[in-house]
Image: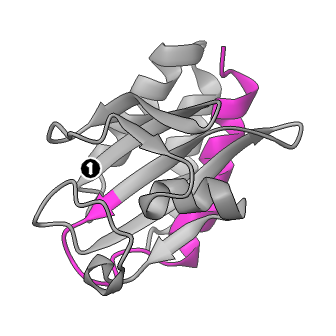
């Protein structure tokens, strides 16, 4: 539920800097963490059949490596589809990073059809994310993919 104005401002900042790779991903997560309802913001890199935690802003997590197919993050890769989860408590396959997390959005980062990784956002209220967030994060994922290395 991000406004177009805020989304465009963040994307403009990312597009106008010269950062690449980890530095760009770190800056993107810092910008996301300042948004309302974006209580944990992270990127997982896909390495074989494992998602590996890359840059993130928020509380530490035990989930630094997630197998494809496990949890919301692993499901996104297995299904090759973004995930918007209104209430994580309704999932049987949920990996809890925080007892406060109520909603989650995962958006895949792709380059030339290949999944490089994903943006994972946790929110502390039910229904924190919608298609406006997905669209915004898809656009961010494109910027990250272009300057991944």
> Is 57 located above or below residue 37 in the figure?
above
Identify the image quadrant of residue 117.
Answer: top right
Residue found at x 66% / y 58%: 78
Identify the image quadrant of residue 148.
Answer: top right
Residue found at x 32% / y 73%: 103
Between 73 and 2, the residue placed more toward the observer is 73
Q: Position of residue 54 (x, y in %)?
A: 42, 27
Split into 4 quadrants, where in the image is the N terminus? bottom left
Between 62 and 139, the residue placed more toward the observer is 62
> Is 100 located above or below residue 97 in the figure?
below
Residue segment shown in magenta: 122-149
Split into 4 quadrants, where in the image is the C terminus? top right
For the residue carrying disc 1, how many other residues have a C-alpha within 10 Å: few (<14), some (14-19), or many (20+)? many
Q: Is residue 34 left or right of residue 114?
A: left
Q: Is residue 29 left or right of residue 108?
A: left
Q: Position of residue 6 (x, y in %)?
A: 46, 57
Figure colour scheme: one colour
Please say whether residue 6 is visible from this viewpoint.
no
Q: Which residue is mark 1?
A: 40
Q: Does the stretch in magenta take in 76?
A: no
> Is 18 located above or below residue 80 in the figure?
above
> Is 133 located above or below residue 55 in the figure?
below
Please say whether residue 45 is visible from this viewpoint.
yes
Identify the image quadrant of residue 89.
Answer: bottom left
Between 21 and 72, the residue placed more toward the observer is 72
Q: Is residue 38 left or right of residue 118?
A: left
Q: Does the stretch in magenta take in 139?
A: yes
């Amino acid at each position: 539920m991000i406004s177009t104005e805020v989304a465009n401002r963040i994307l403009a900042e990312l597009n106008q800097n010269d950062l690449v790779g980890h530095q760009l991903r770190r800056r993107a997560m810092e910008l996301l963490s300042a948004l309302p309802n974006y209580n944990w913001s992270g990127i997982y890199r896909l390495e074989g059949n494992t998602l590996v935690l890359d840059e993130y802003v928020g509380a530490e997590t035990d989930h630094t490596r997630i197998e494809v197919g496990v949890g919301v993050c692993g499901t996104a890769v297995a299904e090759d589809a973004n995930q918007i989860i209104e209430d994580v408590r309704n999932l049987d396959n949920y990996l809890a990073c925080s007892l406060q997390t109520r909603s989650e959005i995962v958006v895949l980062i792709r380059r030339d059809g290949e999944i490089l990784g994903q943006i994972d956002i946790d929110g502390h209220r039910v229904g924190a994310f919608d298609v406006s967030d997905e669209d915004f994060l898809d656009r961010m994922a494109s910027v990250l993919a272009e300057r991944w290395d």
